[in-house]
Image: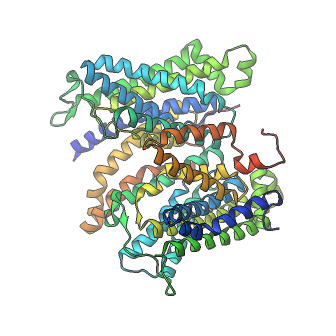
Amino acid sequence: MLLQLFEQTLNGIQFGVMLFLIAAGLTLVFGIMNLINIAHGVLYMIGAYICASVISITGSFWQGFVAAIIGALVVGVVIEVLVFRRLYYRTHLDQVLATFGVTMFFNELVRIIWGPTAIYASMPSFLAGHVEIIPGAPFPIYRLTIIGAGLTAGLALYLVITYTRLGMLIRAGASNRAMIDALGVNIKLLYTVVFGIGAALAGFAGLMAGPLLTVESGMGNDMLILALVVITIGGVGSIRGALVASLMIGVIDAMGRSFLRPVFSSFLPQAAADAAAPAIASMLIYLTMALVLIFRPQGLFPPVTR
Amino acid sequence: MFFRSQHSFAIIMVLVLLAIVPPVAAAFNDDFYVGLATRVLIFAIAAISLDLIVGYAGMNSLGHAVYIGVGAYSVGILNFYGIDNGFIHFGVAILASALVALFIGASSVRTSGIHFIMISLAFGQMLYYLAVSVNTFGGDDGLRISRHSNFVVGTLRDPVVLYYVCFGILLVVLFTLHQLVESRFGMVLRAIKSNEARVVSVGISPYRYRLVGFVISGVVCGIAGALLANQNLFISPASMHWSRSGEILIMTILGGMGSLSGGILGAGIYVGLEYFLSRLTEHWQAIMGPIIVLVILFANRGVFGMLSATKRRRK
């Protein structure tokens, strides 16, 4: 039981780290450009597709890795320049609907290029296998790598935002857009760069998710909703909130899926427990969000705005 | 009187055209278009119900397809247990959507703006996953409905009867909601949308008004869901997915927010485009997506907004 608990916690953290990579870009873009981007899941999907197909052509994981990140970055920058740039000063409703249209387009484009059926991404061979962190509980190396890589990316993001000139501009842009524009900073370029960072992070999450999940059209949609839940719980615009909330959501989800059934069957008849457990488990994340919002409507770590 | 004067001519024309769809289709011996037009009417009801909260109360719900699902599953589940009485079907659909709207509304109408969008989205997905995980009623594969709602005097089996029932309900919804938004209640809703602080300062608590508006909107959309179940004889979780909510919202925007009757045009344009493009290519969404983007970027006041002679300056 304890070993299973340990294993599920790690699984939850791994899922949470992936969510964080998507949520970080989403919350960064919201915090600075005030844009709510439904199409962010598209970049995750594109990362997964490009990585999987480059690996199947060249056989090299690293080429797939680089191609996926560059691909997501390029697509992100192109849609920013073509569409999103015109949306920054629109209402949130307009933003949601326009980016919804962008999502529709890319989900179908992927179907045109790669076909309607799911494709499979192979795991790099040097990351296959298991490791026993505590004796008797083998854990896949690949999932551990995701945790490590995701946390590293998160740390890098934190360092860039806190200690570099670019980060200073980003923070300044988040607190007062008009002011840094007036100070002569090229705000259009800054926005494109921020959007590119978010896109690359989402692509990174996508390429790592490939071998674990099926790579198919629309795979970004569900992750996007979860990422939206994460940034709502964490406080829209807050990177720190996104990190805490994504780990929380990841662990709650993993726990719900593996432990609700045994817990329920301890006090419910077996048939009722079998029916109720998966239903409650699939709603658990949203119930958590509702609960958080009742007590803290602005999320756990609302960013300070001026 | 009945409609805003500047739109009244267009609206009456549209309604007259809709009224003669079945005989015209019969003359051309093509029943298919009755089905397509029925779909337009059903989604028009949904889009109008959404307009009540988006256009008049400023609650931008991205989870409205939930009520389509609740209404349709009410019919489907009752039928699953052998009950085909239409009064029970629609009664339960109304009651169930009211309860769901009350539950979702009670915890979400306190919030506004971006938080409201996200919460409505999250609750929508919550019910979507609930429908996926309940295997008794088909889970992910959906639920077949064996019989149409039976209203003792007749059933909704005949497509033409179903069409005119939808048309009648659309007229009733349009009239009732029009009366509602012009009433004191509607004025309070619109006042909350334009300046909540002032509403509070004159001693009105916005919460109850928003919640009641939210529930009414959910109920009307639930009726649309029950009608949809009768048309398709099938319901699956896919019809309550958030992308469906997005489509209904697009219809509302296309028709023009805050115009109620615009929902008919919005639904007509969207369903029509969907039909036309999907005959053109199976990858119709690759064309629909950019169209939506262009509409939002350049015509987000809707068709009526563009037709309207009084051009208000956009903010």
Quadrant position of residue B22: bottom right
Tell me where residue B42 appears, x and y as whole percent. 56, 64
Question: Whole-percent x and y of residue B183?
Answer: 79, 68
Residue A300 seen anywhere in this rendered image of the structure:
no
In this rendering, is residue A206 above or below B292?
Answer: above
Residue A159 vs A300, above or below: the answer is above
Left or right: residue A289 compared with residue A53: right
- Residue at (44, 38) in percent of width and height: A107
Q: Using the image as rendered, state which of residue B227 and residue A232 is in the foreground.
A: B227
Residue at x 40%, y 80% (from the top left corner): B83
Q: Is residue B146 above or below residue A249?
A: below
- Identify the image quadrant of the N terminus of chain B: bottom right
Q: Residue at x 21, y 47 (%)?
A: A1
- Numbered-mark total: 0
**Going by the picture, which residue comes out furthest to the front?**
B28
Residue A109 at least partly seen:
yes
Residue found at x 30% / y 17%: A62
Q: Is residue A114 above or below residue A258?
A: above
B129 and B264: which one is in front?
Answer: B264
Farthest residue, direction left: A136
The location of residue A229, given as percent across then percent down, is 49, 44
Q: In which quarter of the image is residue A92?
A: top right
Relative to B309, is A217 on the left or the right?
left
